[in-house]
Amino acid sequence: MSKARLMQGNQACAEGMIAAGVRFFAGYPITPSTEIAEIMADELPKLGGKFIQMEDEIGGMGAVIGASLTGVKSLTATSGPGFSLKQELIGYACMAEVPCVVVDVQRVGPSTGLATSPAQGDVMQARWGTHGDHGIIALSPGSVREAFDVAVAAVNFSERFRTPVIVLLDEVIGHMRERVELPEPSELKIVNRKTPTDPPETFQAYRPDADEVPPMAPFGEGYYHHVTGLMHGYSGLPTASAAVTNELARRLESKINRAQDEITLYTEDGIEGADVVLVSYGGSSRAASAAVKMAREQGAKVGMIKLITIWPFPAEMVMAKTRKAKTIIVPELNTGQLVGEVERYVGRDRVVSVTRVDGELFKPEEILEAILAAGGAK
């Protein structure tokens, strides 16, 4: 029998999280992410998991952190204003190195904005929404099948690096339906967090291994584990030491940045010999891909990079893939957020920003026009 299914992006995301081992969800319903909560409420109890609808988005994030500290893979999902409310506790999870996943199905903002319309306006918030220096991983799928794959990757990365991971869906991908064939469970690579090999009497909760990631002991298994949002030493106890603060702050970034190659996920199409290269992601990549095909029919030498990993920004890869291009076009459903990172690494003189913020999708012709204006056709 065929494994083909007609599936919504939010559904694929939820099923990917479950396949990766998520067994706890806490959150608050908010459009356009609500289907994820609904599916989790239905499916997790069947697997011995737990679903809790909290009183608000802040409570949802707090419950996810608490559940993860007990050793359970944990998830919350939200949109727009809810993502803003979660930021303080996302910072807490970064500092306390608590693995968890936050799905943000983006919509038009700021504030209430347009609750049912697509946008990609949370890209910089995903990176810098919580205060202070910190590393972060943010992934953005561009199809329903990718929503499943990215969900699995997000859980794996959170466990691997002891960090919150943000999945930047958007209303386009979250609510669209496509024919997909999902992998069998046996085909998936599943990562679980490292646990201590030291006995409880010598265990230090934040002493990192060579990869700069400390093992993590679940609450209730006999290990002392002090958790705080304050700067702390290996024991987890607060400190005001300049040396310890410097070491911790830098490690929270370097444990992620040093694994850039492992974390970077992307696809490419026709980069070799292209005069014009599109750098796209998420829902915008749908129109961008169609525009590339239309441009090629007119003789254009055009290629495309579809970013799946947004943060840490894959600078080395983007520089290498666009080195010979005359023009790099970055289409986004915002006023220009990720384009700044592209300009930072390849130079502003070659970069063209194409934006839309009216709650409507790009038409391929809009991006095609930018390709042709850049001299992409013969």
Image (cartoon, helix red, strand yellow):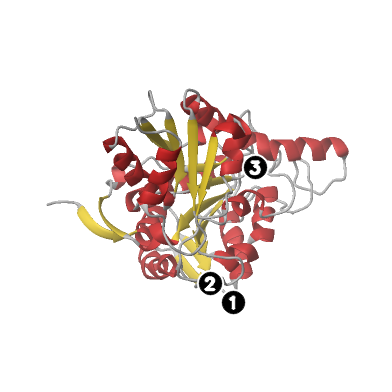
Q: Amino acid at mark 2?
A: Tyr
Q: Sequence-wise, which precedes: disc 3 or disc 2?
A: 2
Q: Amino acid at mark 1?
A: Glu
The residue pinned by badge 1 equals 55
Circle on res. 1:
none
Are the residues tagged 1 and 2 within 8 Å (C-beta)? yes
Identify the secondary structure beneath mark 1: loop
Q: Sequence-wise, which precedes: disc 1 or disc 3?
A: 1
The residue most toward the bottom is 55
- Identify the residue at image location x=77%, y=35%: 247
Are the residues tagged 1 and 3 within 8 Å (C-beta)? no
Q: CA distance from mark 1 to mark 3?
A: 29 Å
Viewer-nearest residue: 109 or 317: 109
The image shows residue 56 at horizontal and vertical percentages of 60, 73
Query: Is residue 214 placed above or below 175 in the rendered structure?
Result: above
- Identify the residue at image location x=34%, y=61%: 176
Are the residues tagged 3 and 2 within 8 Å (C-beta)? no
Q: Sequence-wise, which precedes: disc 1 or disc 2?
A: 2
- Are there few (<14), some (14-19), or many (20+) residues within 10 Å of tag 1? few
Identify the secondary structure beneath mark 2: loop
- Are there few (<14), some (14-19), or many (20+) residues within 10 Å of tag 2? many
Identify the secondary structure beneath mark 3: loop
Q: Amino acid at mark 3?
A: Gly
- Identify the residue at image location x=63%, y=28%: 210
Viewer-nearest residue: 307 or 166: 307
Viewer-nearest residue: 47 or 357: 357
The image shows residue 23 at horizontal and vertical percentages of 45, 59
Quadrant location of the C terminus? Answer: top left
Q: Nearer the viewer, mark 1 or mark 3?
A: 3
Q: CA distance from mark 1 to mark 2?
A: 7 Å
The residue pinned by badge 3 equals 135
The residue pinned by badge 2 equals 28
